[in-house]
Amino acid sequence: MAVRKIIRMGHPTLRKVAQPVAPAAIGTAAFARLLADMIDTLHDYGGVGLAAPQIDESIRLAIIEVPGGPTRYGEVPSLPLTVFVNPRVQVIDETLNGVWEGCLSVPGLRGYVERPGGVRVDALDRQGQPQTLELSGFLATVLQHEFDHLDGKLYIDRLADPAKLMFEEEFLRWTQ
């Protein structure tokens, strides 16, 4: 369909709590176009996840696609393209998992964020059918990161130590 512009930190939409998607909207042509645009945008920008607010659509919709294998985040498990409509997250493992996170809406920076190591998510899929996933480790981090966007939060809000926010070039030089 179309690659959309990803809005960046400072844009007011990124700080709003997104509105739920009406179940009746899921089967519409407009929803299908938006979802296709999000997939094209995710692939074009080279991310592993994208939330609708990042393309200035303040609704509770996110997609995640992790190819797995060696990535800029190290060796990670894969997750095929998955659509999450109106997700609800429950922590199932409170053990903290630390990851140097980046974000398409906060380009050029990395920050060390600790999040719960395991989560369960209940959401609707792209056809409006209920789905439940339990994820741990890196995939749980990606899920929580994307769903934070639906609540008007960025990963930088989760930094315990501001000294662990750095430009990507310095991250690659000093922490790898």
Image (spheres, rainbow, N blue to C red):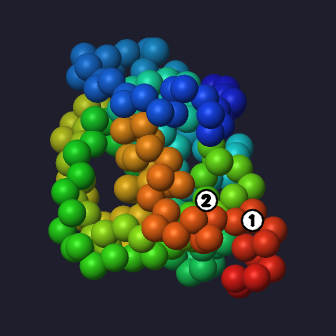
Give, as a three-letter code, the residue at label 2. Gly
Residue 138: image quadrant is: bottom left
| Quadrant in which residue 19 is drawn | top left
- Residue 46 on image: x %, y %: 68, 52
Compared with 157, 123 (above or below) is above
Asked which quadrant contains residue 102, the reply is bottom right
Q: Disc 1 marks which amino acid? A: Glu
Marks 2 and 1, Cα distance to the nearest angstrom? 9 Å
Is any part of residue 125 visible from this angle? Answer: no
Residue appearing at x 36%, y 38% in the figure: 151
Name the residue that disc number 1 marks: 168
Q: Badges 2 and 1: C-beta atoms under 8 Å apart?
A: yes
Left or right position of 126 against 110: left
| Quarter of the C terminus within the rendering | bottom right
Callout 2: 10 Å neighbours few (<14), some, many (20+)?
many
Q: Earlier in the sequence, mark 2 or mark 1?
A: 2
Residue at 75% over, 63% down: 167
**In the rendered view, would you say 128 is above or below 161?**
above
* Mark 2 lies on residue: 102
Residue 147 visible:
yes
Q: Nearer the viewer, residue 38 or 51?
A: 51
